[in-house]
Image (cartoon, coloured by chain):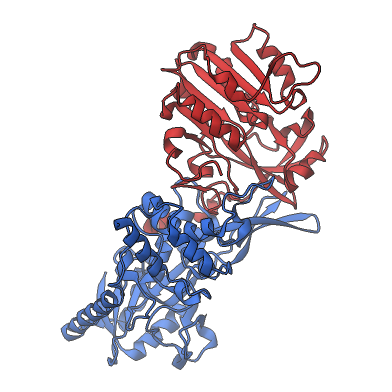
Chain colours: A blue, B red
């Protein structure tokens, strides 16, 4: 579809227009870049362009921590349809949805709850204007600005009054928004586009510099389970599960059942391979009983199993796991240790 | 995977809910051994399955567990599952009676590749309750015996009263059957006159064309491990089929639990060739 200019005032009109038809979530102007709030509860001055990704992983909108999925004996249980829009997503957020799509939108079986939310949600992204020390999207085939996966990309370059708006060519929702609000879009001036390129380049350079100390080794899935690095990680891990809960691509869940009156509700609740009971089977056998086997699983999964099956990493480099870890485990250090040992 | 554009064009209101079970009535119960029972289930609507595929069986309100039906896929109105009492769900199932209602969904996974077995000798090795999925396979092999070569069954259990499917074993061992049966128990009793020892003892002298044959194994991990080692003396790695077992919740590759190397057991298995899984560390743990 292309790229356009939009004035600050038209931007607010655009959000108003989107929110007349959808439940719109926006980043709030907290001191910390923390979470999304509903637009209609906020004054327009409260919305802001986050400099980098928020703390909340976007999976919570599509794959909530706990939800009902079926009833018994009726079996009749359908997802609710809610038209939604989320503003303020970064490239790593969009990349996380691509990972989850591989899991929940399988060719043979589709998760109807994930799929309907995915179909019903307008994704409005924006570029990164700063990087965190923990960001490493550049090492997992990403970059600090969206290339695809969004419906609209709204860019507000630092120091600029006007915005740039990209509309994804393949996005029917993006096209719909454009067509309904054409008067808000202006042609993009050349100088702003040049500024955009230079902003993107400088973000990329900064990420390269921050992360030049490690590489993701090849064939992570086949690194020996006896490698000493795993013992080190297990010594620091306190098994809290924070890394997996906050990870935007971790998708493990457990089905559970609860009876209310005479109806059985089946639900889905997040699970974590950090937890001791994760792989226990009836009778008591537990192949991932040791903490070492569980900590290494995250690496095998994201850089091994997922990569082997889908040809891209199951990690987006968002760095949330690094920030959230009480044991100060940094995935990048672990990958570095593994590569050094692999070379020797 | 569906792309977002493909997804946008789909009518999602007509999607099936893969998390929903259908009610099934327990229409028969057979006590197989002190810890194992076979349940005949009659689902509200027939559930078609291929031999070796599995279902998720639920005790409503308590939870689910995965089982491979032990009956023939050619019987469509009912299906049978053979269940060892091992945990909460199986414990509750063992206390259920004819007429009680359970839930089932599925079938899931990849079962036994009958087409790969056509024209070849087939060795079936079972341990304990591991004979359950193999019985379903044996029903299919013997339904069209001309399609397959010689069918040998080697089955071992802890003790004589732990051998399951005693009626079928009598038939299969009668000489009138297409199946060449050999049994063994870890420990005999005063009436037992047959082999005593582990099932691998029965694999030393195989009276079949192992070079062109296939082997199918199901049993407890320790039995699978040593059986596989022994079979590799006779069979190609890619001709040995193993039934893998892991913690499973969803049954279709989303919940993450049953990971095995680069595979999910529920979706890529539960039946794997030895060749597919041989390099996975700690395979039998």
Q: In this view, does B164 lie to the left or right of B182?
A: right
Side of A73 where B95 appears, left or right: right
Q: In this view, does A209 lie above or below B160?
A: below
Picture coordinates of residue B243, whole percent (x, y): 55, 35
Considering only vertical position in the picture, is A269 above or below B80? below
Give left or right: position of B108 versus A32: right
Question: In x, y percent, where is residue A290?
Answer: 57, 56
Quarter residue B81 falls in? top right
Q: Which residue is drawn at 74% across and 20% down?
A: B166
| Identity of the residue drawn at 20% across and 79% down | A197
Foreground of the two, B135 or A237: A237
Q: Nearer the viewer, residue A24 or B246?
A: B246
Q: Count every numbered label the image shows and give the total.
A: 0
Residue B128 left/right relative to B91? left
- What residue is at 53 percent from the left and 14 percent from the top? B205
Res B106 → quadrant: top right
Of A330 and A16, nearer the camera is A330
Image location (x, y in percent) of residue B63? 70, 50
Q: What is the x, y in percent for residue A45?
A: 44, 93
The answer to whether A198 is drawn above or below residue A122 in the figure is: below
Which residue lies most toward the top here? B176
Can residue B15 be spotted in the picture?
yes
Question: Would residue B73 be visible to someone looking at this image?
Answer: no
Viewer-proximal residue among A254 and B273: B273
Quarter of the picture holding the C terminus of chain B: top right
Quick check: B262 above or below A296? above
């Amino acid at each position: 579809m292309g790229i356009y200019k939009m004035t600050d005032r038209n931007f607010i009109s655009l959000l108003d227009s989107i929110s007349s038809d959808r439940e719109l979530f926006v980043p709030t102007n907290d001191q910390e870049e923390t979470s999304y709030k509903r637009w209609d509860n906020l004054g327009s001055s409260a919305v802001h362009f986050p400099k980098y990704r928020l703390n909340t992983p976007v999976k919570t909108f599509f794959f909530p921590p706990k939800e009902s999925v079926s009833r018994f004996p009726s079996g009749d249980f359908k997802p609710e349809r809610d038209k939604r829009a989320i503003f303020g997503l970064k490239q790593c957020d969009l990349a996380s949805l691509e990972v989850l799509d591989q899991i929940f939108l399988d060719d043979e079986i589709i998760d109807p709850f994930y799929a309907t939310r995915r179909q019903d949600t307008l994704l409005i992204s924006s570029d990164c204007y700063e990087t965190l020390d923990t960001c490493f999207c550049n090492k997992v085939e990403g970059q600090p600005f969206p290339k695809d996966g969004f419906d609209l990309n709204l860019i507000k370059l630092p120091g600029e009054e006007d915005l740039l708006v990209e509309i994804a060519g393949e996005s029917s929702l993006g096209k719909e928004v454009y067509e309904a609000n054409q008067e808000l879009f202006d042609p993009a001036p050349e100088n702003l586009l040049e500024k955009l390129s230079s902003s993107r380049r400088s973000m990329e350079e900064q990420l390269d510099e921050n992360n030049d100390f490690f590489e993701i080794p090849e064939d992570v899935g086949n690194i020996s389970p006896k490698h000493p690095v795993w013992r080190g990680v297990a010594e620091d891990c306190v098994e809290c599960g924070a890394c997996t809960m906050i990870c935007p691509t971790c998708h493990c869940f457990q089905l559970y059942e609860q009876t209310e009156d005479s109806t059985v509700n089946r639900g889905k609740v997040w699970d974590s391979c950090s937890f001791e009971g994760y792989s226990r089977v009836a009778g008591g056998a537990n192949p991932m009983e040791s903490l070492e086997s569980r900590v290494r699983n995250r690496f095998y999964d994201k850089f091994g199993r997922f990569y082997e099956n889908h040809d891209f990493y199951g990690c987006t480099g968002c760095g949330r796991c690094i920030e959230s870890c009480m044991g100060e485990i940094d995935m990048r250090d672990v990958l570095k240790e593994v590569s050094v040992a692999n070379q020797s | 995977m569906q792309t977002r554009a493909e997804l946008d064009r789909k009518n999602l209101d007509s999607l099936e809910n893969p998390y929903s079970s259908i009610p099934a009535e327990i229409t028969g119960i057979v006590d197989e051994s002190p810890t194992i029972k076979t349940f005949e289930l009659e689902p509200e609507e027939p559930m078609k399955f291929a031999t070796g595929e599995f279902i998720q069986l639920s005790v409503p309100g308590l939870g689910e567990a995965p089982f491979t039906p032990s009956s023939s896929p050619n019987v469509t109105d009912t299906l049978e599952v053979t269940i060892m009492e091992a945990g909460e769900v199986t414990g509750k199932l063992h206390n259920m009676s004819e007429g009680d209602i359970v839930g089932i969904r599925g079938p899931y996974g990849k079962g036994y590749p009958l087409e790969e077995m056509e024209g070849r000798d087939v060795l079936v090795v079972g341990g304990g309750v591991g004979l359950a999925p193999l019985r379903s396979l044996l029903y299919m092999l013997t339904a069209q015996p001309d399609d397959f070569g010689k069918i040998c069954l080697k089955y071992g259990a802890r003790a004589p009263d732990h051998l399951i499917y005693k009626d079928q074993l009598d038939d299969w061992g009668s000489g009138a059957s297409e199946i060449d049966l050999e049994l063994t128990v870890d420990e005999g009793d005063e009436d037992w006159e047959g082999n005593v020892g582990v099932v691998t003892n029965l694999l030393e002298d195989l009276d079949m064309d192992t070079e062109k044959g296939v082997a199918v194994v199901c049993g407890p991990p320790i039995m699978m491990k040593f059986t596989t080692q022994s079979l590799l003396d006779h069979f190609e790695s890619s001709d040995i089929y193993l039934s893998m077992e892991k913690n499973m919740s969803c049954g279709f590759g989303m919940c993450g639990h049953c990971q095995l190397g680069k595979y999910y057991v529920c979706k890529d298995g539960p039946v794997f060739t030895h060749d597919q899984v041989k390099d996975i560390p700690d395979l039998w743990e």
